[in-house]
Image (spheres, helix red, strand yellow):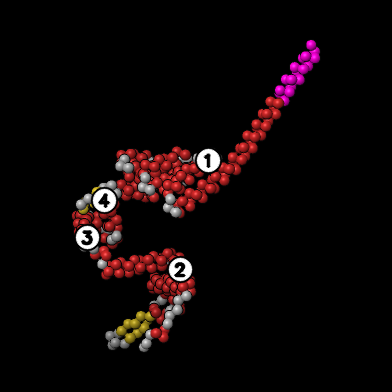
Amino acid sequence: MKEKIINILLIVAIIIGIETTFLTFKSLKHFSMKKDFSAKDSSNMDIQKKLAEEYMNQGLYEKAIDSYEKYISLPSLTLEKKSNLSYIIGNIYMDDLSDYNNALANFVRAKVYYPTNSSISEINKKIVACLEKLGKSVDAEREMSKVTSLTGKEKEDALKSKENDIIVAKIGDRNITMGEFNKEIEKFPMAQELFKEKKKKLEFLGQYIAGELLYDSAKRQGLDEDKKVIEASNFAKKQLMINMLIENEVDSKLGEPAEGDIKLYYEANKDKYVEESKDEAGKITKVQKEYEEIKDRVNFDYRIMKRQEKINGLLDSLKKTKNVFIYNDQFKE
């Protein structure tokens, strides 16, 4: 009997040992899988991010969204990152695909995932804009009044979006919206005060419609293919591109000149700031203008000089790149 009990106890011990070993093995396997999954997860993050960025560069917006969605679905991603990615997806739907339903859904998702997102005011503004685009003006008004974080400028932007739905005139099947009309008015900054009157606005609208009718008639006659029109358009386009290049490469990098540099420029160019005056007898007197009297003019001249220096530097660089050579001897006196 005693031997029988001992045998039973040994069998139980063996079973417990096997069970413990199995559980330990299972636990270690789970830990190992978790580690592997975490590494795989991190790798997937990088891949999906790179894919999404490359798809965006190639204009494959739907593919980019698909990669961003796979990125969002990764379990290790924080709610803040999920919110930021939802905001990015919303912008793609809104700006690149004009799909305002899906854009709205993603902006809402971004807001819900992380309400304290640093871009929350932008998210709120875009929710309002999407609602307007979807014809849900009442919802947009309610959302706008509900969101206190919208700044004055953001409210103005949302109202501009609404302007695109207000039709002020029709030319056949084409609608002219308040937004389009206001953009035309903005092209005349010196006359902004004038356009505050309803009468003047209607006069301008009449002129704008007249211009559009004449332009449409010219197109129907094929004048957009006329050689003179094409040459003039190409010339205007060329000049605009040159001006934009100079603005980007020169004007935007000039900065504010130092007072000391302006004074040195004045001292080196004093003869430019001499004025002549005649007395009653016709005698000419030259008067040297002091710096303090004309410092605004000197400042302007100095900036023009520095601007031209930078333009010349840009041209020299471009000439070297393109190996420019001028054959002077081909020109006769």
| Mark sitting on residue 257 | 2
Mark 1 vs mark 4, CA separation in Å: 44 Å
Quadrant location, the C terminus: bottom left
At x 42%, y 73%, the residue is 308
Mark 4 vs mark 2, CA separation in Å: 44 Å
Label 3 vs 4, first from the N-terminus: 4
Mark 1 vs mark 3, CA separation in Å: 56 Å
Residue behind mark 3: 220
Mark 3 vs mark 4, CA separation in Å: 23 Å
| Mark sitting on residue 251 | none
- Amino acid carrying label 3: it is Arg
Label 1 vs 4, first from the N-terminus: 1
- Amino acid carrying label 2: it is Pro
Residue behind mark 4: 177
Task: Please say if 112 is above or below 10.
Answer: below
- Amino acid carrying label 4: it is Thr
